[in-house]
Image: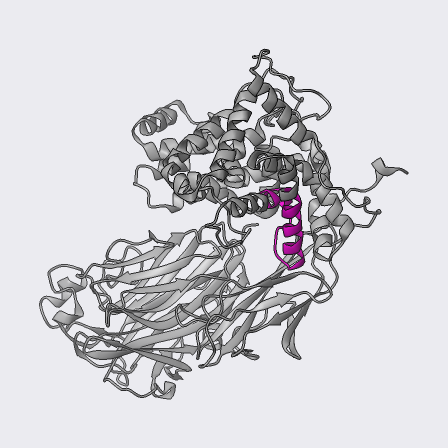
Amino acid sequence: MGEHTRAVQGDAVLITRAREGDDEACGELRERHGRAALRLAGLLTRGREEAEAVTAGAFAAVFEILRQGGGPSDAFRPFLLTTLRRAVAGHRDTERETFDPDIPFVDPALAGLEGRTVVRAYLSLPERWRAVLWHTAVEGTSPGRVPQLFGIGADGVTALAHRAREGLRQAYLQLHLAEALPPECRPVLDRIRVYLRGDLTDREAVRVRSHLRGCARCRTAVADLKDVGGRLPDVAALVLGTAASAYLLPRGIGLPFRWVGTVLSAWWWRSSPGRRKRVATAGAVAVVLTAGLLVWPTGEPRTLVRQGETPVAEEPDPRRPARSPSRRAQTDQVNETERMIRTLSSRPGPPAPPRPVESRALPVLKAGVQPVGALVPGRTGIVVLTVRNEGAVRSGEVVADVSLPRGVAWHDGSSGALDEGWSCRPVESVLRCGRPPLPPGGGASAHLPVAVAPDAGPGASPSVVLPGSAVRGRASAGVGASGLPARFAVDGRVRVTMVGNILLSCPGHEPECGPARQRRGVRLDNDRWEMGPLDLDGADGTVASSPALLEASGRVRWAGLYWSGMTEPDSGKADPRKYTARLRGPSGSYRTVEASWTERVSLPEHQAYQAFAEVTEQVRRAGRDGGRWWVADVPALTGPGTYAGWSLVVVSDDPEAEPGRTVVLDGARALGTGGTTRLRVPLGGLPSGAPARIGLLAWEGDAARAGDTVLLDGRPLSSPNAFTGTLAEGERTLSFGMDLVSYRAQPTEKSVLEVVSTADALMVGVVTVMTPSRR
């Protein structure tokens, strides 16, 4: 019926075809984005020939990355422009950095831009949202002019852009609220969006305005939120660098500014590295210039837009000569610059292959693999496989081949059972996993239990490929000696509950013991007491016993019992069979539980251990309502400076919880002794972009000794005295030598949890993370 009625495929479909080596798809991508790339290249290079060469090289580099399984899935143009800018930087600069287009490339003059909250919020969004924001917000193109880039109609692009804007606002506020804020700022930021809409009551609005007058942090948040509703100048500068203002200015307006931007860009890339460093402090000027020029008023007619859209200038027409309504008489130099820019902007890109023939819509599959926590030699762990269908049609049966590094083997029959719908089996040198088809926009994850050999080499990482396609992925982390491995992981509407109690305490007959348990007096450390058994069950057959109330929300998915104490020094390997505990549920009698894993560490004067046993079936049999659980008689020394205790960690269904991923990491890691003051716990294999709940179980922390802190990506989550003998939030009773603490945070896929202790000797035993999925 003609070319204009032919179904148009979005960039996502063309990218998938390009990964498979489809030259027609590559040609279509060149045709769509070649003019934009040539425009940026013209601002960064000396002349037309060099600009064309750089543009052709950038396309070749992007297509090579796609064929290797990397690169974008939707946001082709920002990726292309970043690749081009890197190529120019490498061509000009002898200090060329490692080429990795997945990492934002920031001009030295704009150093620190990637750390701005608006930019971090933008980078946390799904790629399809970033793509639509780039075209409609940053480049200012009307949704009615870019539907072919997304394979949907103009109304669909408008709706997608609206969702992306809203997601950016939410991500920005969540990042702000995740920071350590003064108490007076949090209620203001909670209501800031309502304030900007003008929906607050007069009294509330006055209160907010009064706070803003005296708070620079919140004023910055308000300004950034206004930017979120505009042209996103920080995001433009992140991708385009110092050429952002010249690239984004419409034709026929601000020609002197475009000339200045071009000259400054050319001067920057031609300058020596030492010269650049001397002017790096002028980077703030580039940001201000970019922000100002993006909102510079024009006298040109504007395209009619729907209510709520950001008005944008028309795309440049290469056949129409540019004119400046405010300055008709230009100097010869400016006229020459105008001619040069018009030539660069109107010249076609590299010749494109013939247009692709009509084809049906295809599923767009993406696959990734990542260790959950760490893969530690001599321990079991979990590798998560994720497959998503980002296309517009249902996929076929999903088959994924996972390659595990040398020394890492599939641990079939482990407690980390496969997720519903998946099945896996070894096939030659890979683990082949399959599941039923995925609907459009659907995704599924499989948590693969693995065993890491004691002699497994460090550094090697898992990878995945979808057979018969170019879809592949490799984990960013592999086998390593640090961190904590995963004991259990699951996706769904679940919650994790940690309860427990101590088994040693100060002697109850001493007058100062009671006040000390209420955190009064000076004897708040177990070093100041002759620690003895705490026996609360009243039974004749136990020496030390204590209870904890478990409130389960639904069907129990997994339950683990941890217990710990101090033992005499022993250089031999711990025999788990020697470490037993007695467990009693809400009904029935005590039953002996034998540890399946035990690890020992050295603390001052004694050795400490942590033992583990899975007790899922016992907790399930007790019923969904939980109840009071008792633990008694674990191996433990008594006397000054000793401790003993236990914790029950339960993952259960919770229909009111957000869908997400819950993981339990464990291990015995001593801090504050032998020169070790910092524990790094990578939180790989988790969704990002949503507030998470992080829980910790720690042993032998002292309430009277500060210097222990919990951090996420270098930002404190706790006070300078994180471990103070606390078993529940707000609890006043002092629990000598045991802590169950939790924090709200917003991790990313590459976040690292850190525990630092410079004065207090302690042991970290368990880390739990509940992260909602947000796409």
Q: Is residue 727 in the magenta section?
A: no
The picture places residue 613, in percent across and down from the top left corner, at 41, 78
The picture places residue 219, in percent across and down from the top left corner, at 37, 31
- Judge whether residue 232 can be spotted in this image: no
The picture places residue 63, in percent across and down from the top left corner, at 67, 52
Write down the region rendered in magenta: 55-81
The image's colouring method is one colour
Vertical relation: 641 (above or below) 578: above
Q: Nearer the viewer, residue 519 or 69?
A: 69
390 on left or right of 455:
right
> Image quarter for residue 147?
top right
Q: Nearer the viewer, residue 113 or 654?
A: 113
Q: How many marks?
A: 0
Q: Is residue 59 in the magenta section?
A: yes
Q: Nearer the viewer, residue 590 or 72?
A: 72
738 on left or right of 345:
left
Q: Main secondary structure of the magenta part?
A: helix
Q: Nearer the viewer, residue 224 or 456?
A: 456
Residue at 54% across, 19% down: 297
Which residue of the protein is positioned furthest toward the right in this rendering? Answer: 1
Vertical relation: 289 (above or below) 632: above
The picture places residue 653, in percent across and down from the top left corner, at 51, 62
